[in-house]
Image (spheres, grey):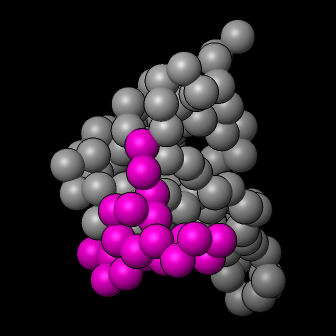
Amino acid sequence: MKLILAHIRPHKLDEVALALRQLPGLTGVSASTSRGWGHAKQEAEKEHRADRVSDFEEYIRLEICCVDSLAEDVIDAIELSARTGLLGDGKIFVSALEETIRIRTGDRGEGACPPVPTCLRHSAS
């Protein structure tokens, strides 16, 4: 299992969500607002860094748990749909997931994230 974390521009959330919904076997996505700065911010404002200590950019943080075989498809969907080609497009982090536990049932591992049947997936309409 993989844990994929992505920080994307807020205005790209709908496009990324639509791309992820098209992936068979993806069980869900968590999204939250995050704030931070990175290389893009440093490059864009080198001369102003001392003046702005807490000038963070707003991003959307996506958290996705998926089986190993689906990870590259998830990464590609995020990367292609979130890209604008400009500084600050975001980052994708991928790590091995040691354990997953569904609290309600106690299911563990892949059993905690079973695929959602196609007929129950949200449509893009």
Name the residue rendered at 64%, 47% in the picture.
9
Q: Position of residue 124 (x, y in %)?
A: 64, 16
Name above or below for residue 57 compared with residue 13: below
The answer to whether 19 appears left or right of 104 in the picture is: left
* Residue 66, above or below 42: above
Q: Vertically, is 106 above or below 28?
A: below
Q: Is residue 105 magenta?
A: yes
Residue lying at 71% horizontally and 68% vertically, measured from the top left: 34
Q: Which residues are magenta?
A: 94-115
Residue furthest left in the image: 69
The location of residue 53, given as percent across then percent down, is 77, 87
Residue 121, how many percent across, how many down? 58, 28
Inspect this view and state whether residue 81 appears. Answer: no
Point 59% across, 27% down: residue? 120
Where's residue 72, x and y in %?
24, 46
Does residue 122 belong to the magenta stretch?
A: no
Quadrant location of residue 95?
A: bottom left
Magenta stretch, main secondary structure class: loop
* Quarter of the image where the C terminus is located: top right
Residue 62 appears in which quarter of the rendering? bottom right
Q: Relative to the observer, which residue lies in front, 37 or 113?
A: 113
Residue 24 shows in this picture: yes
Total label count? Answer: 0
Q: Looking at the image, which residue sits at the far front?
A: 105
- Image quadrant of residue 59? bottom right
**Residue at the image point whose x is 40% and y is 31% from the top:** 23
Q: Quadrant of the N terminus?
A: bottom left
